[in-house]
Amino acid sequence: KVFICPPHTMVTSALLQHVFITTATTLLVPSWWVSSFGPQLTRITVPPAFVRPTHSVTNIDTVNVRPSSPTSLQMSISPEDPSSKRVANEARTAKLFHSTPLILSDPLTALLNSGNNTKPRNVYLKMDALQTSGSFKDRGVAHLCQTLHASGTTKLISSSGGNAGLAVATVGKALGMTVQVIVPETTKPMVLEKLRGLGASVQIHGVNWNAADVLARDLVEQDSEAEYVSPYENPLLWTGHSTLIDEIVEDLGVEGIEGATVVASVGGGGLLCGILEGLQRHSLHETTVIAAETTGAASFGTAFSKGEPVMLDAINTIATSLGALQVSDSALERAKAHIANGGSVVSGVCTDAEAIDACVKFADQHRLLVEPACGAGLAVLYSDRLRKELFNKDKNTGPVIIEVCGGSGVNLELLDMWKTQFSL
């Protein structure tokens, strides 16, 4: 069978599921889509991609679709209606993740506009630190795990430096699923305690997340009942993360978010992929996205400046949750696609001291603890150096929205220790 996609239809992983359901073997799509998104799906789908661009006929390209088992299909694609502006509805209805507040920050608005002779800009905080597990990870993990659960999966194996594992343990427990989390040796004791408190089986392995991830994948290969949950590399995760853009649009309206700048921390790239997916879904093509990292974990910034994937030699940062040696290829590809559509993606790299200083100031002004990985995003505003460097070049004049991604690897004792360490 052949499924023909109308020229203006948004081609998403959900459409691909429709193709499978109708047993079509070939999908016809506009040629621009193949050049922009076909190669991306080929590289990111887990297990190996079932989408492959083949040839063009005038302005329409053919994409062959290979069969896949029901379980692997559910891992790879989203079941949502591609015409819907709001996704991950089943996970949302089941309260596996929450709509979080978008609040106007008076202190950061004043800071951004101080000495600024151009149009004043409001600064908003998207408070994903208030998700059940403590971070934005609940969004994508909820969508992925709910989809796996609906397909009959009962056991999840994840690799994590903390926040993704906590999200898997939180969502898995709510769904009645067995959860095993492989964590690196750098994982904080408080995170290990939280994981075990949620009923997850925890195994410590390797000096960094990459080593822990290898073991997690091996364990999944050995267990026919288990499915692998990546911290950031799965289209279902990205679709789940994109729900934060849906909520921002609902709060501010499409006109209210026009000309906006969105600031988010980047580790492996899952959150960035989700944000860019949400912006595309709402046709917010001219949005500026600032991808924030620390100097010792700048896998995105390094790769983005070189225009190709780069493997870091090591992770050397207090923001261990950003510790992926290589950012997702898809994050780079989606960033390039966003730029090609008229938007802007900018790398913002802070020092560990700037990240901690941002965490301290944020706690003082907004009464909420966040870990250094989240501090990297906040430092884009709190650091005088970064604020001037990034916003003096920003062509947009709309609201600035900071994704307060949260993180559970922080408490009062740690924050006080970091303040002393960096003489703040």
Image: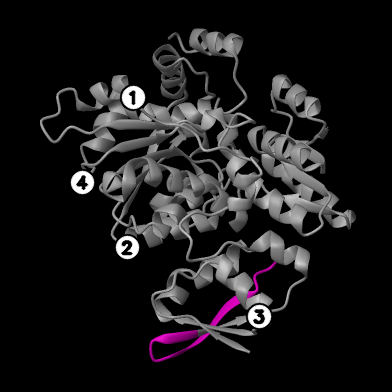
Mark closest to the chain's N terminus, 4 or 2: 2
In the picture of the structure, the residue carrying the numbered disc 1 is: 105
**Left or right side of 398 for 327:** right
Q: Quadrant of residue 85?
A: bottom left
What residue sits 46% from the left and 60% below the top? 333
Q: Position of residue 167 (x, y in %)?
A: 67, 37
Determine whether label 3 and label 2 are within 8 Å by CB.
Answer: no
In the picture of the structure, the residue carrying the numbered disc 2 is: 341
Q: Which residues are magenta?
A: 46-61
Q: Secondary structure at mark 2?
A: loop
Q: Residue furthest bottom?
A: 57
Determine whether label 4 and label 3 are within 8 Å by CB.
Answer: no
Q: Taking the image as drawn, is residue 147 in sight?
A: yes
Label 3 Cα neighbours within 10 Å, binned few <14 / some 14-19 / many ≥20 = few
Q: Secondary structure at mark 4?
A: loop
Mark closest to the chain's N terminus, 1 or 3: 3
User: What distance separates the C-alpha of mark 1 from that of mark 3?
Assistant: 48 Å
In the picture of the structure, the residue carrying the numbered disc 4 is: 395
Where residue 22 is drawn, which disc sits there? Answer: 3
Of the residues shown, which amino acid type is indicated by label 1? Ser
Mark closest to the chain's N terminus, 4 or 3: 3
Viewer-closest of 144 and 305:
144
Q: Quadrant of the C terminus?
A: top left
User: What distance separates the C-alpha of mark 3 from that of mark 2?
Assistant: 32 Å
Label 4 Cα neighbours within 10 Å, binned few <14 / some 14-19 / many ≥20 = some
What residue sits 59% from the left and 70% below the top? 42
User: What distance separates the C-alpha of mark 4 from that of mark 2?
Assistant: 15 Å
Mark closest to the chain's N terminus, 2 or 1: 1
Check residue 132 for magenta coloring: no
